[in-house]
Amino acid sequence: MKGGIRYHPEVDPDEVNALAQLMTWKTAVANIPYGGAKGGIGCSPSDLSISELERLTRVFTQKIHDLIGIHTDVPAPDMGTNPQTMAWILDEYSKFHGYSPAVVTGKPVDLGGSLGRDAATGRGALFATEALLNEHGKSVAGQRFVIQGFGNVGSWAAKLIHEQGGKVVAVSDITGAIKNEKGIDIESLFKHVKETRGVKGFHDAHPIDANSILVEDCDVLIPAALGGVINKDNANEIKAKYIIEAANHPTDPEADEILSKKGVTILPDIYANSGGVTVSYFEWVQNIQGFMWDEKKVNDELKTYMTRGFKDVKEMCKTHNCDLRMGAFTLGVNRVARATVLRGWEA
Ligand SMILES: NC(=O)C1=CN([C@@H]2O[C@H](COP(=O)(O)OP(=O)(O)OC[C@H]3O[C@@H](n4cnc5c(N)ncnc54)[C@H](OP(=O)(O)O)[C@@H]3O)[C@@H](O)[C@H]2O)C=CC1
Ligand SMILES: O=C(O)CCC(=O)C(=O)O
């Protein structure tokens, strides 16, 4: 099983279960050999010191070390966790079971992490966006993007989109939201965020209401923070033509219906953000083989997986005359069902 560990105040068992289930379909859509998992701690990581975070993570690992393992359950980063968190889990796990780098992915490269994993979810979202836009005769260059969340996923997506000539006109994080119609200089924004720990106060953009980020005028909206942010209260106001679900379950079912009637095309989370778990798979494979790929190989393989995934989802949409979300779920559920029946379960 495979999935990230989340540190966030809203983490609870129901949310973890739902996120684990999404991982089952996501790994099936990506066609990688895992089931779904997820974990989390209800806490506010930004209010904890490094030492508190380390102790919390080590005690958590002491509780779960018999549940995780290289062929049972392989954690990775999610919201509020990062390569350092994975390094602590690896170290604590190794005290019980011996040194096993493949027990976590998304670790620091110096501990056997994969080159390209840090950027992978954002890069995968870029490849997914390219596949979708190309199908509509468009490219990333010249499109106007709005991104909610400027953490691992949102910041990498912004950087890579900017490098491809896309115009990122608004971004937000927990400190606030900023906008520049002419396009935000993402490199300068990275420097600002490093110095001030948030997008708020960036000199080359003006502040906007953080609640309005999702309804800002743009071509492509990328939610890359929390779940449930696109709902019946704001779906009617959304102006984007395309939504790329870099976050997990950012759109609730009522909003999905409203947006579909409005003709908005949504690239669903279980495909759009699968770049992270796909490169986690590459990391696990490299650890097991004891061999390290160069970054170009990681990125090229990721592109192959994302492009193939898009083709497979579209094929399902054609066969069943359905939208991309239903196509992705049908693909994932069918793959799991086929494997289950082959193992001897009654159909
Ligand atoms: N990391 C990964 O590889 C993967 C992540 N995902 C999903 O992507 C999403 C983001 O994860 P990730 O980037 O790793 O998490 P991070 O913790 O790195 O970043 C989360 C970002 O969201 C911001 N944020 C939190 N609350 C709000 C809010 N209310 N409004 C606006 N911004 C907010 C945070 O702000 P601040 O930093 O200021 O707190 C931060 O910028 C999650 O849904 C996660 O499940 C999906 C696949 C893989
Ligand atoms: O990289 C991984 O193994 C899991 C990533 C994750 O948590 C997700 O895709 O939601």
Image: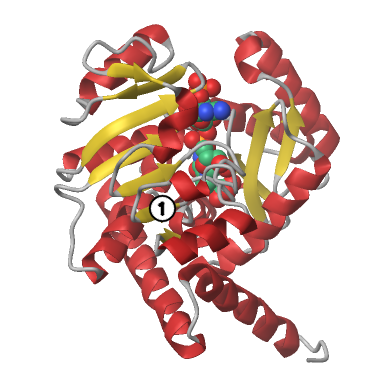
For residue 35, which quarter of the picture? bottom right
- Residue 290 in the image: x percent, y percent? 47, 51
* Residue toward you, 250 or 153: 250
Residue for point 67% across, 18% down: 54
Packing grade of label 1 (10 A; few <14, some 14-19, many >=20) is many
* Residue toward you, 137 or 110: 137
Residue for point 35% across, 49% down: 240
The answer to whether one can see residue 138 in this image is: yes
Specify the quadrant that holds the C terminus: bottom right
User: Residue at label 1?
Assistant: 244
* Residue toward you, 337 or 150: 150
For residue 33, which quarter of the picture? bottom right
**Position of residue 293 in the picture relative to residue 331 (left or right):** left
Counting labels gives: 1
- Residue 76 in the image: x percent, y percent? 59, 42
SS at badge 1: strand
Specify the quadrant that holds the N terminus: bottom right
Residue for point 29% across, 16% down: 206
| Amino acid bearing label 1 | Ile
The answer to whether one can see residue 83 in this image is: no
Residue for point 73% across, 22% down: 43
- Residue 46 in the image: x percent, y percent? 60, 15
